Amino acid sequence: MQAQIEKLVKLQSVDLERNRLTLAIRALPSEIAQATAALTAAERLSADTSDSLTREESLRTRLERDIASHRQKTARFRTQLDSVKTPEQAAAIEHEIAFESAEAERMENEEFESLERSDAQEAALAAARANVEFLAGVLDKTRSRVEMSMSELNAQLAALTLERDSLRPLIEADALARYDRLSGSRGTGIARVENQQCTGCRMGVRPQVWNQLREGELLSCDSCGRLLYWDPAMAPAPKAPQPEHTPAARPRIPKSQTAGA
């Protein structure tokens, strides 16, 4: 029975490692997806910043055209002011001059603000493009690393699968079927007993079961159903014999010097 227990324990170790490798292999593509998403977001930010810069340039082009128009109107109204004949006409033209001048000044301020925004956007665009270049390199490295990891993990998984396939025929059919059923439902099918507890569910075992396990039997946990075994190698080392304690001899009391004097 001890040989069967050892094979079941080894089989479970192989199965757990295979499960770990399988999960690791499944997780690898997500690393590429994350790196791709980061690059896509950086490219979108770079494109949006470039579009904002283009819009600012278009805005300044329109402002420059409108400013020139307002300045021309101001000059034309000033020319007309020399030929007016009534105070009312002069007041009306002066109102137009003030309006056109104010509009030109407002647009010049807006143009200056646009220039300031463009300066900030140019710096942001340079940083965004540098980030795109960096993340593109990260994506290339991630793909190479994932490809290498995938190859290594698949090789390890193939070796473990061969070991698993060689172990299973060596285990009794009934014990193997119970192990498969428990592994499928609980993740593990066999558990060691330590300190009279199942290490799978941490529930205590009955004294009779504990004694049978220590004799090398393979039993089931009353709580979780896992196959239970006891590993003699985990037994605590026997205590060293303690030296016997002998009472100390009583000190001799000298006889009185005056005795018999």
Image: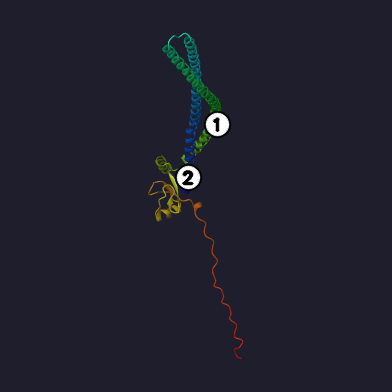
SS type, badge 2: helix
Q: Quadrant of the C terminus?
A: bottom right
Using the image as rendered, state which of residue 242 and residue 33 is in the foreground: 33
Res. 9 mark: 2
Mark 1 nearby-residue class (10 Å; few <14, some 14–19, many ≥20): some
Q: So how many labels did they put on this image?
A: 2
Location of residue 122 (image quadrant)? top right
Q: What type is the residue that disc 1 sits on? A: Arg
Q: Position of residue 84 (x, y in %)?
A: 45, 9
Looking at the image, residue 93 lies above or below residue 227: above
Res. 145 mark: 1
Separation (CA) of disc 1 from disc 2: 34 Å
Q: Position of residue 21 (x, y in %)?
A: 49, 36
Residue at image coords 45%, 17%: 99
Q: What type is the residue that disc 2 sits on? A: Val
Res. 66 mark: none
Mark 2 nearby-residue class (10 Å; few <14, some 14–19, many ≥20): some
